[in-house]
Amino acid sequence: MKTVVLKFGGTSVGSIDRIKKVCKIIAFYKKKKNRIVVVSSAMSGVTNELINKSKLISNNFDKAEYDTLVSTGEQVSCALIAGRLKHIGFKSRSWTSWQLPILTDGPHSGARIKSVGIKELNKYINSGGIPIITGFQGISNDFRITTVGRSGSDATAIMLSKFIKADECIIYTDVDGVYTTDPRQYNKAKKIKKIFYDEMLEMASLGSKVMQPTSVQDAKLNKIDIKVKSSFVLKSGTLITGSKNNFSNQIITGISSTKNDAKITIMGVKDRPGVAASIFRPLYKNLINVDMVVQNISQNGKETDLTFTIKSEDLKKTERLIKKNKSISYKKLSFDKDLSKVSIIGVGMITTPGITYRMFKSLASKKINILVISTSEIKISVLISSKSVKKAVAVLHKEFKLD
Ligand code: ASP
Ligand code: MG
């Protein structure tokens, strides 16, 4: 008998009608004589509503109460699913995080799951029951309710799969898998059959919102294969895995792009140890996320130029922080916004020469100007004008045979 963890996202349980449909999916797996564990997210919109309420009560809402509040949506959807399954003749019950328990470490709203109690669960599953478990929430060492980050039900499903030693972990969502690039932006985007954790991590953190990045990290660390499927249409999904079996020899797996990036260049900064740290310390203190960083080679050994990117919404604040930073001196500051980062991602590039050249040549053929370049083992990113993103994605998609 296989143990299957089924996780349903907010839109999958977004209405009473949707919950009834989800119960049909659960029934399908159960009838195949599987051991089933269900994890559910809150009905879509509910978590946001709760967050808004907390803001209306206080602009400094207590962190522990915040988690207690925003985790309630999951209890509602789980009770509704269990109730419906009973209605159609199955044995089922809901479980909240403290009842199992799901123990977490770390701060409120950003906790990580460290263990899941499975003793009672296993007994219940062995007796034929279908447990429905609240995603997103856990409890801390001092028995307070915690949450594991927005979209964190994915992490609950993955950690549960680990502790219950599941054979399969299926994440049901509103898209039918991970695509080579955003299908809403480019109509030749193709569904990816298999993707490595590392590639998925790059895709996820670069803005393909199919899964929460920390959950993909959890899956990678614990070697849990994940299937992403749609609960709306019957279609094969995407497998996220570390296993090298049956991978095509595709070099580039996907292309992603960001919106609203801004670039700052500080010209003529003193070239001596500690300068970069002095520039970035106040940004870090103000929680401004710096993405690409490039420092030019100093011409005269005394001065250099430093360029970095941030989100456009942080531009004003960053400008202010640099101008009032007494620990650095420079000749000139310049700013640019309406920029986007376009990245090609694929583990295949580690062993294939010429990928950088092909990327730059393709962009040049469309007269797209590159402002900043950064690379990692499995990713090459360029910063370009947001106006050219569509063109860039199209030409790269074609160049790397993803069309
Ligand atoms: N309901 C939570 C959220 O909206 C968790 C989740 O959806 O996975 O962030
Ligand atoms: Mg979600």
Image (cartoon, rainbow, N blue to C red):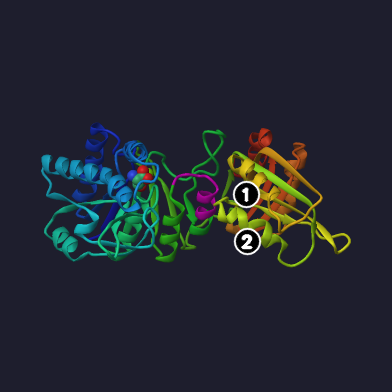
User: Is residue 355 at all visible to an observer of this figure?
Assistant: no
Q: Is residue 343 left or right of residue 334?
A: left
Q: Nearer the viewer, residue 27 or 316?
A: 316
User: Is residue 272 at all visible to an observer of this figure?
Assistant: yes
Q: Position of residue 316 (x, y in %)?
A: 63, 41
Residue at 58 percent of width and 53 percent of height: 250
Residue designated by label 2? 377
Q: Secondary structure at mark 1?
A: strand
Identify which amino acid the numbered label 2 is placed on: Glu
* Relative to 316, residue 301 above or below: below
Find the magenta span and give its range.
200-210
**Along the polypeptide, which appears first: circle 2 or circle 1?**
1
Q: CB under 8 Å between callouts 2 and 1?
A: no
* In magenta segment, residue 206: yes
Quadrant placement of the C terminus? top right
Residue designated by label 1? 344
Q: Residues within 10 Å of mark 1 (few under 14, many from 20)?
A: many
Q: Count up the numbered dots.
A: 2
Q: Nearer the viewer, residue 315 or 363?
A: 315
Q: Secondary structure at mark 2?
A: loop
Residue at 21 percent of width and 60 percent of height: 100
Identify which amino acid the numbered label 1 is placed on: Ile
Q: Quadrant of residue 263?
A: top right
Q: Residues within 10 Å of mark 2 (few under 14, many from 20)?
A: few
* Relative to 264, residue 108 above or below: below
Residue at 20 percent of width and 50 percent of height: 30
Quadrant placement of the N terminus? bottom left
Q: Position of residue 34 (x, y in %)?
A: 22, 55
Q: Residue 221 shows which numbered tag?
A: none
Q: Position of residue 342 (x, y in %)?
A: 64, 44
Q: Is residue 345 left or right of residue 353?
A: left
